[in-house]
Amino acid sequence: LLLGLAFCPRGRFPWREGGKLAGWQTAVIVGLYLIRFGTEGVWPGLRTSAQLFLAFWPGMVFVQSVPAAEIARTLGRVLPYKTAFVLSTSMRFMPLVIREIRSIHEAQVLRGARILPRDLLRPWNWPDLVHCVLVPAIIQSLALAAEIALAARARDFGCAEGRTYWPGK
């Protein structure tokens, strides 16, 4: 983890996003442990949250610090090239999907949907989250996947027996 932090470019490291995610994750997990086990659930909840944080943080550092082309090339050495393509493409477009979800959420909040965090404390508002954010996000993700598939098909991806690539780097 420390080695990844040392080599991560300054402008690309997700300090704020990762910190927010860790904070929300800790609050939710400790809250669930408190509901289930009472005050004795605080320490196991914190431990579980720390374990999840330590499991995913190195991956976040890795994805932020290594160029996508290098990740795809490395995955192609150990996995079939189609699987490597799918994994590297999904890692590449995940930030785009997250931005789309945020913009959908903001637009729906401006339209008056009850999907703010304080509104979601009431379970009867959860269907609004599904109808206003999750369904449009899934539709946008499927449209993006269709565009990626069309672009890959236009480049004859998968037609050759082995991997074809530009002989550059």
Image (tube, helix red, strand yellow):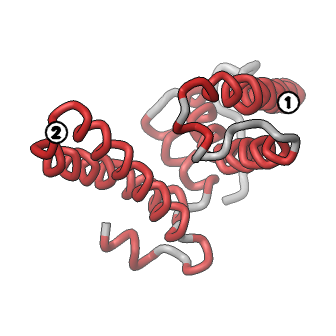
Q: Position of residue 41 (x, y in %)?
A: 15, 42
The quadrant in which residue 12 appears is bottom right
Q: Is residue 129 above or below residue 158?
A: below
The quadrant in which residue 44 appears is top left
Q: Which residue is mark 2?
A: 38
Q: Position of residue 67 (x, y in %)?
A: 60, 60
- The reply to whether residue 149 is in sight is no
Q: For this rendering, which residue is in front, 93 or 130?
A: 130
Q: Secondary structure at mark 1?
A: helix
The kind of residue tagged 1 is Glu
The structure residue drawn at horizontal position 10% and vertical position 44%, both measured from the top left corner, is: 40
Number of other residues with Cα within 10 Å of mark 2, as a class: few under 14, some 14 to 19, many 20 or more: few
In the picture, the disc for residue 147 is 1
The structure residue drawn at horizontal position 18% and vertical position 49%, both measured from the top left corner, is: 42
Q: Is residue 20 left or right of residue 127?
A: left
Q: Is residue 100 left or right of residue 8?
A: right
Number of numbered markers: 2
Q: Is residue 72 left or right of residue 166?
A: left
Q: Position of residue 137 (x, y in %)?
A: 74, 31
In the rendered image, the quadrant that contains the C terminus is bottom right
Q: Residue furthest left?
A: 40
Q: For the residues carrying marks 2 and 1, which lies nearer the camera in this image?
A: 2
N-term-proximal mark, 2 vs 1 = 2
The kind of residue tagged 2 is Gly
The structure residue drawn at horizontal position 73% and vertical position 50%, both measured from the top left corner, is: 99
